[in-house]
Image (spheres, rainbow, N blue to C red):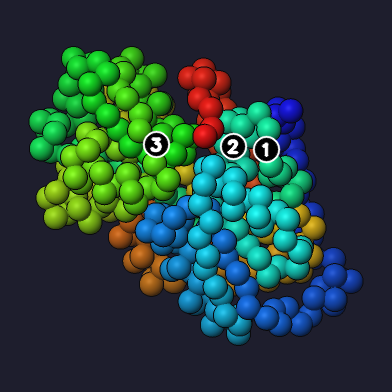
Amino acid sequence: MKPSIPTLGRRLALAALLAAGALPGLALAQGGYPAKPVRVIVSFPPGGAADQIARAIAQPLEAALGQPVVVENRSGANGNIAGDYVAKQPADGYTLLMSSGGTVSINPHLYPRMPFDPVKDLVPVAAAARVLVYLEVNPQKVPVASAREFLAYVKANPGRLTYGSPGNGSSPHLAAEMMKASANVYATHIPYRGAAPAMQDLLGGQIDFMFDPGIGLQHVKAGKLKLLAVGSPKRSPQFPDVPTMEEAGLQGFDADTWFGFYAPGGTPPAVITRLNAEINKVLRTPAFAERMNAIGGVPAPMAPQDFAARAQADSARFGSLIRSRNIQGD
């Protein structure tokens, strides 16, 4: 049975607090951490936002921990495959999940039978970045100059336009559903196994538009795609002249997603505390900020309990949308 939103929120907060409480006995027991390589399991394919964030953090984290940090990709089921894998690993801090917050806050609303309990079996370690989604069109397919013109064009051509996403229930998919519901328009969704293959089809003209989690901004700058709007409450600091979806007429539009690290439930609090501190140091470096700027993201250092609270808010925000639009996971 899916956990209710209030129950989910309470359990997220409790899990984070338990992880953050540095118990002296456990701290002593984990005094030698890490003593071997740390694996980071990315829940999406290479090239996507999660993969780029993980790899941007892995090298400096490796230097801080004094052990190799190995990034592996295990994509599928909107993060459930990677989440299930990490949830079943030893709770010793040597296997971490890098995923969008959707694995914890969105998937329980999408799947009637989860292969793992995302709250009990995973514990928040550290947020990494707030990733904005950017409404981009292939200008050869969609002849519009602004977000308002785009919404009018979609309304005038119901069902004719297609859009891609990293998969059913992914944040770019939910952003498009949010737009369709708010603007009362219809377009056809084509789910992919990750943002990178969807972006390739957008560039190739197989689909018309996409809410991009940042990987296509290089193509915007090259003139291959047209950026119309950002799906955040505020304008992107990287593109201050690009309006928000709210400025285009869609009130309260907020499709931001938060990427971060999780560990198997029961991981010692001292290990969580160490990892959180080291990851936050990386997030505050100019080098990481520059990497995030390239994909339109914003570094998001915070404590585990704050990351859990963010997931609770996202669960409430997206849960109602998922139910109203009858969205189901793959």
Q: 318 left or right of 139?
A: right
Q: Which mark is residue 107?
A: 2
Q: Which residue shows up at 61% across the image and 82% down it?
A: 67
Q: Which residue is mark 3?
A: 191
Quadrant for the N terminus in the image: top right
State the image coordinates of residue 129 (x, y, percent, origin top left): 47, 55
Q: CA distance from mark 1 to mark 3?
A: 20 Å
Q: CA distance from mark 3 to mark 2?
A: 16 Å
Q: Quadrant of residue 86?
A: bottom right
- Is any part of residue 70 visible from this angle? yes
**Mark 1, secondary structure of its residue:** loop
Q: Nearer the viewer, residue 209 or 13?
A: 209
State the image coordinates of residue 141 (x, y, percent, origin top left): 13, 33
Q: Which residue is mark 1?
A: 114
Q: Nearer the viewer, mark 2 or mark 1?
A: 1
Query: Up-down: is 8 above or below 156?
Result: below
State the image coordinates of residue 300 (x, y, percent, origin top left): 50, 56
Callout 2–callout 1 Cβ contact below 8 Å: yes
